[in-house]
């Protein structure tokens, strides 16, 4: 049975099955569901397992499921990193599930995935797709979690959203920091910028913009003078991707509106200080070139995540040089 994630976010009690699969790229949303489920089952014993551990010790897992005592707490199992490999085991234990609850968490599963199809079609199982957030969904989270804070202006909301690069897990961490810092519940923009480390990220923003502007001289200067944190390379890629996707959005709107109207229609809006670079870039880039750049950022992200031996900063600098050169291709 398929459940809509936004409905369960509002009411986790709407989940009626004791067997449920949560899958998708939105790690923050999956973590939110874990928190909801832990709160909902606070009288139960929470047992966290990994799929590989279960595959290696099937008998132990079967005994865990079968051994039910009237004097023990109800058990709730969180099974991480699940895939089609565990489906046979789930099918075998499904008839034996009584008071126990099993919640499976997986990364992206395509439509051909056996475990996804099984959970979607079964009346005894639930399936919840956790897709990536957008500006609207993140804005709702901010407004909900900081509803009793003054100073939550549109500018400050956009500041938080832009810093988090559409990552809910990062947003949740920043909201915790904001709550801890602004104990008087009055958000000040300058202090918020310091808290979010905006000035440090601005240094990379300068480099990103000059590369997208196709300015070879300034890009080379900034590549030499900008210290890039190797732990933030995925964040840097997200910053580049976010700008490329916003350029695509405006280029598509330009088919029906003037450039100024198209820029004013995108949400969240372009900050005034970003507009000069954005106008340069919209003249330099077309859809085909942007798609080429997005493929490059995707390939680099895969390489960074899959190969721990590569020099990440060298690869990141090469990407920026490639983007600068691509910007100047006619």
Image (cartoon, helix red, strand yellow):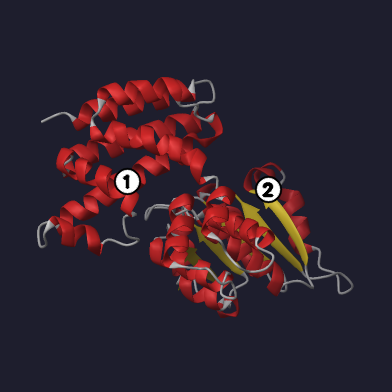
In-image side of 217 versus 201 (left or right): left
Residue 39: horizontal and vertical position, in percent?
Answer: 70, 71
Nearest the viewer among 193 and 102 is: 193
Which marked residue is nearer to the observer: mark 1 or mark 2?
Answer: 1
Among the 4 quarters of the image, the one containing residue 240:
top left
In the rendered image of this protein, does residue 212 appear above or below residue 190?
above
What residue is shown at x 34% (from left), y 28% (from top)? 320
**Spatial CA span between label 1 and label 2:** 42 Å
**Quarter of the rendering occupied by the C terminus:** top left
In-image side of 42 versus 23 (left or right): right
Residue 164: horizontal and vertical position, in percent?
Answer: 48, 52
Density class for disc 1 (Cα within 10 Å; few <14, some 14-19, many ≥20) is some
Specify whether residue 108 is in view.
Answer: no
Residue 318: horizontal and vertical position, in percent?
Answer: 36, 22
What residue is shown at x 59% (from left), y 74% (from top)? 17
Check contact, mark 1 vs mark 2: CB within 8 A.
no
What residue is shown at x 23% (from left), y 25% (from top)? 325
Residue 117: horizontal and vertical position, in percent?
Answer: 43, 61
Which residue is identified by label 1?
243
> Between disc 1 and disc 2, whose residue precedes?
2
Secondary structure under tag 1 reads helix
Which residue is identified by label 2?
54
What residue is shown at x 64% (from left), y 56% (from top)? 177
Nearest the viewer among 157 and 301 is: 157
């Amino acid at each position: 049975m398929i459940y809509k994630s936004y409905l369960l976010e509002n009411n986790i009690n709407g989940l009626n099955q004791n067997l449920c699969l949560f899958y998708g790229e939105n790690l923050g949303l999956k973590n939110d569901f874990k928190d909801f489920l832990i709160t909902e089952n606070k009288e139960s014993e929470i047992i966290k397992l990994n799929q590989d551990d279960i595959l290696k010790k099937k008998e132990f897992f079967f005994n865990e499921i079968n051994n039910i005592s009237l004097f023990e707490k109800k058990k709730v199992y969180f099974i991480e990193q699940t895939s089609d490999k565990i489906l046979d085991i789930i099918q075998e234990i499904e008839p034996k599930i009584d008071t126990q609850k099993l919640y499976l968490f997986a990364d992206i599963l395509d439509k051909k995935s056996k475990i996804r199809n099984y959970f979607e079609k079964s009346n005894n199982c639930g399936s919840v797709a956790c897709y990536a957030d957008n500006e609207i969904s993140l804005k709702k989270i901010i407004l909900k979690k900081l509803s009793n804070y003054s100073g939550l202006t549109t500018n400050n909301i956009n500041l938080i959203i832009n810093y988090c690069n559409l990552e809910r897990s990062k947003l949740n961490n920043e909201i915790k920091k904001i709550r801890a810092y602004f104990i008087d519940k009055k958000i000040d923009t300058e202090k918020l910028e310091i808290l979010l480390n905006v000035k440090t990220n601005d240094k990379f923003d300068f480099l990103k913009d000059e590369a997208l502007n196709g300015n070879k001289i300034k890009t080379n200067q900034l590549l030499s003078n900008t210290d890039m944190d190797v732990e933030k390379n995925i964040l840097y890629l997200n910053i580049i991707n976010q700008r490329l996707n916003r350029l695509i959005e405006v280029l598509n709107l330009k088919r029906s509106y003037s450039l100024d109207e198209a820029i004013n229609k995108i949400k969240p809006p372009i900050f005034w200080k970003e507009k000069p670079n954005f106008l340069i870039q919209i003249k330099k880039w077309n859809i085909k070139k942007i798609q080429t750049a997005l493929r490059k950022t995707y390939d680099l992200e895969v390489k960074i995540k899959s190969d721990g031996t590569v020099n990440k900063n060298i690869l990141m600098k090469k990407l920026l040089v490639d983007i600068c050169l691509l910007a100047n291709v006619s």
